Image (cartoon, helix red, strand yellow):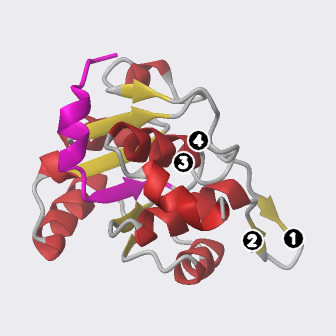
């Protein structure tokens, strides 16, 4: 795991993430009629809402196309959605162009080998606890929680707490 200075976290303006294995546990339920179901974690969802309230943007870069992912992205008001994205690095580069940001401004969370180029390129590259070892070896941070079990929320809290923004966000809950 690489070291990143906590001051560098202040450069992060956008959180990008994979879906299957990051926002979900990587499982996929398919009904007999072909309907797809995914289990998204509500703590992650609320963390994304808090991230937005702090003034930051979000993106999904997923290799699979999924109606469930599109519905969840719409519900959470995800700013940029790339699916299906066969070449995630191309999606990442398009995200940079459309957002006007630099790689140092992006935190990216992944779980599998196709996420390696993005984790390496992002200013803050994250592997979830259940990620493959090849991804963990190049990540700046490895979550204690696994994908689909609060790992995204953990990253959001880590960044916000280490940049001094968490306490302000918590005020509305501590009244």
- Name the residue rendered at 60%, 29% in the picture: 130
Mark 1 in CB contact with mark 2 (< 8 angstroms): yes
Of mark 1 and mark 3, the one earlier in the sequence is 1
- Name the residue rendered at 49%, 38% in the picture: 111
Task: Measure how far apart labels 4 and 2 are at the Cα level.
Answer: 23 Å
Tell me the SS state at disc 1. Answer: loop
Q: Position of residue 146 (x, y in %)?
A: 64, 34
Quarter of the figure with residue 170: bottom right
Please name whichever residue, 10 or 113, is drawn nearer the observer in this view of the structure: 10
- What is the number of the mark on residue 152? 3
- What is the number of the mark on residue 151? 4
Mark 1 in CB contact with mark 3 (< 8 angstroms): no
* Circle 1 Cα neighbour tier, 10 Å, few/some/many (<14 / 14–19 / ≥20): few
Q: Which residues are magenta?
A: 1-18
Mark 4 in CB contact with mark 3 (< 8 angstroms): yes
Q: Is residue 87 visible?
A: no
- Name the residue rendered at 64%, 32% in the picture: 145
Of mark 4 and mark 2, the one earlier in the sequence is 2
Tell me the SS state at disc 3. Answer: helix
* Circle 3 Cα neighbour tier, 10 Å, few/some/many (<14 / 14–19 / ≥20): many
Return the residue at label 2.
Answer: 36
Of mark 4 and mark 1, the one earlier in the sequence is 1
Return the residue at label 1.
Answer: 31
* Circle 4 Cα neighbour tier, 10 Å, few/some/many (<14 / 14–19 / ≥20): many
Q: Outermost residue, front direction?
A: 175
Mark 4 in CB contact with mark 1 (< 8 angstroms): no
Tell me the SS state at disc 4. Answer: helix
Above or below, 98 against 8 in this view is below
């Amino acid at each position: 795991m690489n070291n990143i200075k906590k001051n560098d976290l202040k450069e992060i303006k956008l959180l990008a993430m994979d879906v299957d294995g990051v926002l979900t546990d990587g499982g996929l339920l398919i009904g007999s009629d072909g309907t797809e179901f995914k289990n998204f974690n509500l703590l992650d969802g609320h963390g994304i809402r808090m991230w937005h309230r702090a003034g930051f943007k979000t993106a999904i870069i997923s290799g699979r196309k999924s109606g469930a992912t599109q519905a969840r992205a719409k519900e959470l008001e995800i700013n940029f959605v790339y699916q299906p994205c066969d070449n995630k690095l191309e999606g990442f580069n398009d995200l940079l162009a459309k957002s006007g940001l630099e790689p140092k401004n992006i935190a990216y969370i992944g779980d599998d080998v196709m996420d390696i180029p993005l984790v390496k390129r992002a200013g803050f590259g994250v592997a979830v606890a259940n990620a493959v070892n090849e991804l963990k070896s190049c990540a700046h941070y490895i979550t204690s929680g696994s994908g689909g079990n609060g790992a995204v929320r953990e990253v959001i809290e880590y960044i916000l707490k280490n940049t001094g923004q968490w306490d302000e966000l918590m005020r509305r809950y501590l009244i």
